[in-house]
Amino acid sequence: MRVVIAEDLALLRDGLTRLLRTHGFEVVEAVDNGPMLLAALLRHRPDVAVIDVRLPPTHTDEGLRIALEARRRIPGLPVLILSQYVEQLYAHELLSDRSGGIGYLLKDRVGDVEQFVESVRAVAAGGTAMDAEVIAQLLSRRGRDEPLSALTPREREVLALMAEGLSNQAIAARLVVTEKAIGKHTSSIFAKLSLPPSDDQNRRVLAVLAYLES
């Protein structure tokens, strides 16, 4: 699986490179600034990109803006944002095309290497991997609208965990209920969001994106 990394801190960039290579990824390029990132994404068209938000030369929202531009040029390019900050405006825009392959994790909340690696794999496969704190901040400024208002509190809880990239089994363990119960909740969520039967993973992605865009 081919990866492009964008991180301006040399130690973290080298650490991510070594970590991903140890777990079988091919890091085709690791860059430290915005212009080099866009060039690397267009040149390599990787299976997934791991991108910091604040990159030179602006040190503001360079990484997110370039991720958006790259996905316009390469539709569906999987992007995992790894940052200390939640940039709400561009994060919502990144989610708005509903094509999946999106993740947003906070550096200081990544405490499990294996879970991080699985998040990278999930995003590369077209899924989502969202930190719970990112979800909370993205939703804090926006109200609920139909059809999300039809979801029960438990269904919203299940959907929030789906947004973190958890499977039904993992959600069941987190909520201390049976996997069968979670299956019923997810079926109800899909029905209320008017997501007809198809590939279950695709419906999960669409449900998560609808939730985050609400």
Image (tube, grey):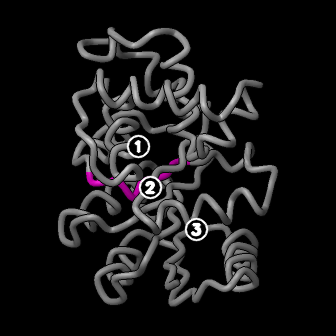
Front residue of 147/93: it is: 147
Label 2: few (<14), some or many (≥20) within 10 Å? many
Q: Residue at x 66, y 74 (%)?
A: 13
Q: Nearer the viewer, residue 57 or 26?
A: 26
Residue 101 colored in magenta in the image: yes
The residue pinned by badge 1 equals 204
Mark 1 or 3, which is nearer the eye?
1
Quarter where residue 190 is shown: top left
Check whether the beta carbons of the residues at disc 2 and disc 1 lie within 8 A of each other: yes
Of the numbered discs in the image, which one, if any, rests on residue 127?
A: 2
Q: Residue at x 53, y 33 (%)?
A: 183
Which numbered mark, 3 or 2, is in the foreground of this view? 2
Does the magenta run of residues contain 16?
no
Residue topped by disc 3: 7
Of callouts 1 and 3, which one flags the residue occurring earlier in the amino acid sequence? 3
The quadrant where residue 130 appears: top right
Q: Which residue lies at the image location 31% right of the left edge and 32% below the top edge?
A: 210
Picture layout, residue 23 above or below residue 155 = below
| Residue 83 in the image: above or below residue 153 | below
- Which corner quadrant of the image does residue 145 belong to? top left
Q: Callout 1 environment at 10 Å: few (<14), some (14 to 19), or many (20+)?
A: many
